[in-house]
Image: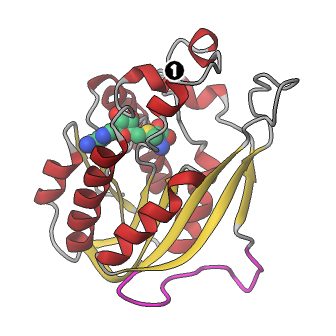
């Protein structure tokens, strides 16, 4: 059975209690610094979504403040990573370069920037402009050039295509930027092995934790917001109770 450790706290603080050199895979989806950008655009997002992330308060830092947060995060992440451990960090395309620069300064070896394509995005303003259907992810290895890559001799593209989150994954409540379980399954399967430790310091509704358990990995998850933490805990407990 997987070992699970969850924190309802600021990850900059909670990560300090994680043992050094203990994480095999860091799989996380931090704030993209898009809250103010989206709020200042007439996207109609607020009217279309009750839980619009621009209003949620966790992604509205000014750029320099956000950069400082990402910097503190990678500093602490570099302490807890095992040498040769992998990291996947989801990000908005316009912030990818900033994240790479910061991560490299803490010893993360940059490998790839890939794309997640949503097959059924919300067709928001589809007659006015391109429909937003992609997010980026950045792949690093800590202090080595290669790590676990369970491709079973198959060619793996840097482009992942899935549907958006199905309703059954939202039964304990909604998170505005929830990732589908099949997406996390792709990365956990490729970049870690059974018994490894997976860390998600910005776990939101706990998707990484649910999948880590399904795949027999240990999991450490951190979430600042009480409401999202409760959703994550319920989802992760539900899986644990079934096994
Ligand atoms: C993009 S969302 C993650 C969504 C997640 N991948 C899922 O599937 O639900 C980022 C999350 O980070 C949380 N967060 C922001 N700052 C944080 C911090 N300093 N420590 C811990 N969590 C934080 C936010 O509350 C938000 O839920």
Instruction: Write the residue at 56% across / 52% down.
Output: 94
Give the quarter of the figure containing the N terminus.
bottom left
Q: Residues within 10 Å of mark 1 (few under 14, many from 20)?
A: some
**Magenta segment range?**
142-156
Q: Would residue 30 appear left or right of 47 to someone viewing this image?
A: left
Is most of the magenta stretch helix, strand or loop? Answer: loop
Quarter of the figure with residue 16 = bottom left
Q: Position of residue 83 (x, y in %)?
A: 32, 85
Residue 213 drawn above or below residue 192: above
Residue displayed at 22% across by 36% down = 8
Instruction: Identify which residue, 198 or 27, lies in the foreground.
Output: 27
The verdict on residue 21 being magenta is no
Residue 239 visible to the viewer: no
Q: Position of residue 169 (x, y in %)?
A: 57, 32
Residue under label 1, please give it: 52
Please tell me which residue is depicted at 40% across the width and 22% down the height of the picture.
56
Under circle 1, the secondary element is loop
């Amino acid at each position: 059975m997987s070992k699970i450790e969850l924190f309802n706290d600021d990850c900059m603080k909670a990560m300090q209690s994680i043992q050094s050199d203990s994480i095999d895979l860091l799989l996380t989806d931090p704030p993209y610094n898009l809250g103010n950008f989206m709020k200042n655009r007439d996207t109609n997002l607020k009217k279309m979504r009750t839980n619009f992330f621009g209003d949620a308060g966790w992604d509205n830092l000014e750029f320099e403040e956000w950069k400082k947060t990402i910097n503190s995060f990678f500093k602490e992440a570099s302490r807890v990573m095992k040498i040769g451990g992998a990291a996947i960090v989801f990000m908005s395309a316009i912030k990818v370069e900033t994240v790479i620069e910061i991560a490299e300064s803490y010893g993360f070896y940059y490998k790839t920037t890939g794309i997640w394509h949503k097959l059924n995005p919300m067709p928001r303003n589809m007659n006015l402009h391109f429909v937003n259907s992609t997010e980026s992810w950045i792949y690093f290895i800590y202090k080595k050039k290669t790590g676990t890559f369970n491709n079973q001799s198959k060619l793996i593209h840097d482009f992942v295509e899935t549907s958006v989150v199905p309703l059954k994954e939202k039964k304990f409540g909604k998170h505005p930027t929830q990732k589908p379980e099949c997406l996390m399954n792709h990365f956990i399967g490729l970049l870690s092995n059974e018994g490894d430790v997976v860390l998600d310091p910005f776990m939101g509704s706990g998707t990484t934790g649910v999948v880590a358990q399904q795949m027999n990995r240990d999991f450490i998850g951190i979430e600042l917001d009480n409401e999202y933490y409760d959703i994550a805990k319920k989802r992760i407990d539900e899986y644990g109770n079934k096994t």
